[in-house]
Amino acid sequence: MRRLIPYLLALLGGLLLPFAFSPYDWPWLAPVCLFLLFASWLHATPLQALARGYLFGMTQFSVGISWVYLSMHNFGGANAIEAGGLTVLIVLILSCYPALAGWMSLRLFGQQGKHIKLLVIFPAFWVLFEWLRGRFIADFPWLLVGSSQVETPLGHGLAPLLGVHGVSLDVAMLASLSLCVLDRDDWRRRAAMMGIGILIVSCAWLGRIEWTKPAGPPFKVALLQGNIPQNQKWQPEFQQATLQLYTEMTRQHWDARLIIWPETAIPAYYHQVADTWLVNLRKEAAPHNTDLIIGIPWLDRSDERYYNAMISVTDKPGHYFKRHLVPFGEYLPFRHVFGWVLDILKIPLSDFARGENGQEPIQAAGYPIAASICYEDVFGNEARDALPHAAYLVNITNDSWFGDSMAPHQHVQIARMRAMESGRYLVRATNSGITAVIAPHGKVVSQAPMFVQTSITAEITPMMGATPYIRFGDWLVIGVLVGVLIFVKIQHL
């Protein structure tokens, strides 16, 4: 029974971790869960750490991304067995990352002392493998522990300085220091308690620094939430009704400087409405000095590739093509291996082309914006491409694919982290929720209820300047961690 305890600790830690995130919002659980995981690794062999990390990941993702099943089954055309099988496959892949973090910690640094493992090795590998999860194979930086801290001193202080991975590192350090508090040595225990206090107080102090400043006067934005049923969205017979709905909602907000529609709000290709309906809409908006941002599919008729696009309806129109596509939703990774998935998932427009890097920023309400579509706002490092020139961030999305699950709440929490990292307002318009206006410190200024046809308005202030994270991105944290691990390894040789 004693041999099972470390495995139970890892399993319990992974099971509880999703509750640190929205909609539950118990951020204090994040360091507790890593405390349990690191405790299970502390006296383990590399293979034992691998198994315990894998258990942690399986329970973490089985609970935390259970909405994947709902998306595939309710909206993707897969039956219960197919959706369940694909969800299990995704969970098994994602679980490899905490497993490898544990294995490499003990395989490369197993001879290090207890406190070096706790204060350096375990936190470093945890963060490195969270970072890799968003870049290598999985391409899925969801449920990063740093994102759970948007309402704590850790998030407020470190997000604009080091980004979400810096916050994750702080959470991991709190977990390690808490383990050190259990040390039998009195001075080590006191030093660990002092370290916990220093981390929290310093983050609270850093959170008072204003890294950016206003670039101009506030202006009013209106965000439209059409709540179009997913099973009607792409039906040709509903196209005119959808266009009419959004047009009428827009006309109610001509007093706004900017009106934003959700992702693929127009269920037609750009070229089908550009010279007719969009022209008329621009003529109607111009006397009110109102700009619009609209989500629409875009077909490049020269090569028959189509893009998930955002367009600006202004006197200086522009467009943005989505660059980071959703695997299995907007494109099929390893098509020669997973081609059979397309036969299961009957998702409209499920094979988009990638937009190019370095696209000209869209201008709206007189300022350049940092544009992202749906899933793109989970990648903090990519939001930096349009900054610090962009005055605010715009995200349009269609979270109705996730139904009434944890996913929309987790997604808006991730968006709050992007606002904190950049020191700018972020406005997000969604089809069914959660439509929201988020302030530079991550506070939700205005939010629409889910699954309601409605709109929200708020005043936002364009911002200028660059947070340290905007200047250096993830590479500051990742580079330091790799450097420290190399130094520790060399010292032990």
Image: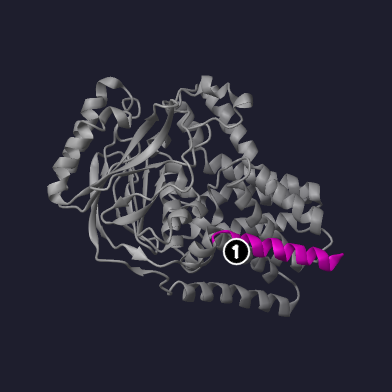
Q: Residues within 10 Å of mark 1 (few under 14, many from 20)?
A: some
Q: Residue at x 67, y 60 (%)?
A: 124
As drawn, the residue found furthest toward the front would be: 302
As drawn, the residue found furthest toward the bottom would be 187
The quadrant of the picture occupied by the C terminus is: bottom right
Q: Is disc 1 placed on a helix, strand or loop?
A: helix
Q: Which residue is mark 1?
A: 476
Residue drawn 52% across the image and 54% down it: 381
Q: Position of residue 32 (x, y in %)?
A: 59, 59
Whether residue 286 is visible to the viewer of this picture, yes or no, is yes
Asked whether residue 482 is drawn in magenta, I would say yes
- Closer-to-camera residue (424/402): 424
Q: Give x and y (percent) for residue 438.
A: 35, 57
Q: Main secondary structure of the magenta part?
A: helix
**In the image, what residue type sits under mark 1?**
Leu
Look at the image and name its color scheme.
one colour
Residue 130 is inside the magenta segment: no
Task: Tell how many labels.
Answer: 1
Q: Which residues are magenta?
A: 473-493
Q: Nearer the viewer, residue 278 or 341?
A: 278
In the rendering, at what x and y percent does residue 209 appear?
43, 74
Horizontal side of residue 383 vs 243, given as left or right:
right
Image position of 206 with respect to 165: above or below: below
Residue occupying image coordinates x 41% and y 25%: 348
| Res. 154 in view | no
